[in-house]
Amino acid sequence: MEAIRIVLKPKKWISEKNIEDASLSLNLNLTLKDKLSSLEDNTHWHFKNGKQKGVLEITCFKKTGEIIFSVHQNRNGGWEKGIIKLITASLAE
């Protein structure tokens, strides 16, 4: 069960590099970059915030441009919701 799930359907195309740059500019640590085998044509990341508990997962679908931010209940550190707001604001610029 997810504690947080936010779907972003941007008006402009957002590249993988844009997502990584926005996340890394907030000093998040990229701990995984892969594809979810259960979903088509995607890139999936895990980001951590220093030594704090919690993992922010971001999935980007290449065909639609849709971006999903998710935090699972067992990986919720409490910092993720604020970071999601900062990342989405950065991507909207």
Image (cartoon, rainbow, N blue to C red):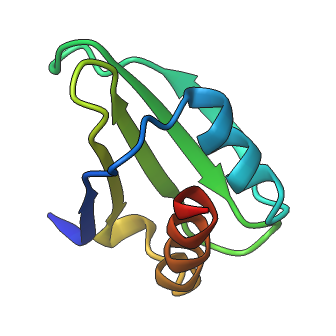
Q: Which part of the image, by quadrant, shows the N terminus?
A: bottom left
Counting from the top left corner in percent of width and height, residue 8 is at: 29, 57
Counting from the top left corner in percent of width and height, residue 19 is at: 60, 43
- For this view, does 33 lie left or right of residue 12? right
Q: Which part of the image, by quadrant, shows the C terminus?
A: bottom right
Residue at 67 percent of width and 30 percent of height: 17
Q: Tell me if residue 90 comes above or below residue 22 in the rendering.
A: below
Residue at 46 percent of width and 81 percent of height: 81
Residue at 80 percent of width and 68 percent of height: 51
Q: Tell me if residue 53 comes above or below residue 29 in the rendering.
A: below
Q: In the picture, residue 26 is in which quadrant?
A: bottom right
Q: Tell me if residue 52 comes above or below residue 32 in the rendering.
A: below
Of 47 and 17, the residue lying toward us: 17
- For this view, does 13 lie left or right of residue 67? right
- Count of numbered labels shown in the rendering: 0
Counting from the top left corner in percent of width and height, residue 90 is at: 64, 64
Q: In the picture, residue 86 is in which quadrant?
A: bottom right
Counting from the top left corner in percent of width and height, residue 46 is at: 55, 44
Residue at 59 percent of width and 65 percent of height: 87
Of 1 and 66, the residue lying toward us: 66
Of 8 and 48, the residue lying toward us: 8
